[in-house]
Image (cartoon, helix red, strand yellow):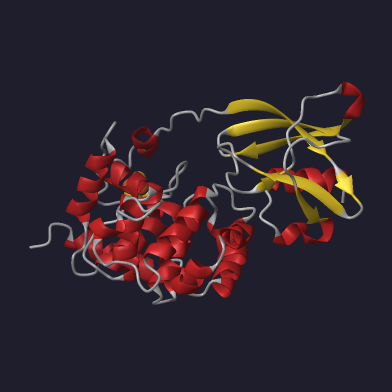
Amino acid sequence: MDNFSQEHTELLQWYKNNGRHDLLWRNTKEIYHIYLSEIMLQQTQVNRVMSEYYPKFVEKFPTLEKLSTASLDEVLSYWSGLGYYSRARNLHKTAQKCPDRLPEDINELQKLPGIGRYTASAICSFGYHQEVSVVDTNIARVLKRYFATLDVSDIEVWESANKFLNTKEPTKHNLALMDLGSIVCTPTNPLCENCPLSISCLGKKNPELYTQKKKKEYESLELFYGIYGREDKIALVKTTGKMYKGMLELPTVDPIEENFIGQFKHSYTKYRLSVKLYKIDNLSDEVIWIDLDKIDSTPISSLTKKALKNFLL
Ligand code: SF4
């Protein structure tokens, strides 16, 4: 006997009428495309992924095999602007490990670079239609409120998801919960009066109590870069630090006041950057010369692109 049969029925009915059925990755059977969308969506909003990055990436690298034979520079250039470039590097490594097909086993998937419990379960549920639960931030929020659980660990949220899973329609159930969290059970001011789970939801009297967020911590950094141009080319170097690893950026310099060109602010993951640019006349680093009109198709950090667009192009 299904303990939540009434709720499951209501939830699926709501999903049928209100779900985000037009998302490109919900209209494909290609497991790699589903996997790609999950990786892109980890840190980027649905609209940006859908309108810009996902179609462009799929067109350029339509299969795991094509992705596996591309150079990392090429992959990074198609990721440019999405940030969190380790995602692209891991995607590329995974394609090289499994150029034909991703494993169907949830544990095997988690052995691949950049695939954690969430992504593995999403691939198994949305791609292979297995009977597994999925927990992303939207689903976690719904479950914490629905079961009115305070200060629960991630493991306990996964246990709630397993308990609540609709084993007859696991894929649609997971997609429905995801959309419910995105559209109805929103972080602030959830629309409980429109919620298919409201009759039995234990947390609806004070939903926000169960999902209070810790304040994000940011780190401020001041960075100094040099601009050295020759005809229609600019000197760049490969990044070696944690930020934008493997991409091209302007060479770093010691600040000399009389060479100051300009400054701007930039955000990258948890960093809030104050960037100052200086003219340089000679170079000590090993540089790579890039044509200015090829900037958009080169794997250049978004910070460097912003600097060039504001001060050079
Ligand atoms: S009733 Fe309200 S708090 Fe409960 S799951 Fe629905 S939207 Fe969220």
Judging depth in this view, the residue of 156 and 78 nearest the camera is 78
Could you say where residue 193 lies in the image, as x and y percent from the top left? 39, 52
Which residue is rendered at x = 76% and y = 30% of the image? Answer: 253
| Rendered view: 35 above or below 146 | below
Residue visible at 26% across and 39% down in the picture? 148
Q: Is residue 118 left or right of residue 237?
A: left
- Give me the residue at 46% from left, 59% from top: 91
Q: Is residue 239 above or below residue 126?
A: above
Question: For this view, does 208 lie left or right of residue 110?
Answer: right
Image quarter of residue 271: top right
Residue 54, can we see it? yes
| The N terminus, quarter of image | bottom left
| Horizontal and vertical percent position of residue 166 | 21, 63
Of 302 and 146, which appears nearest the observer?
Answer: 302
Q: In the displayed orientation, state which residue is furthest to the top.
A: 257
- 226, above or below 296, in the image: above
In-front residue for pair 132/167: 132
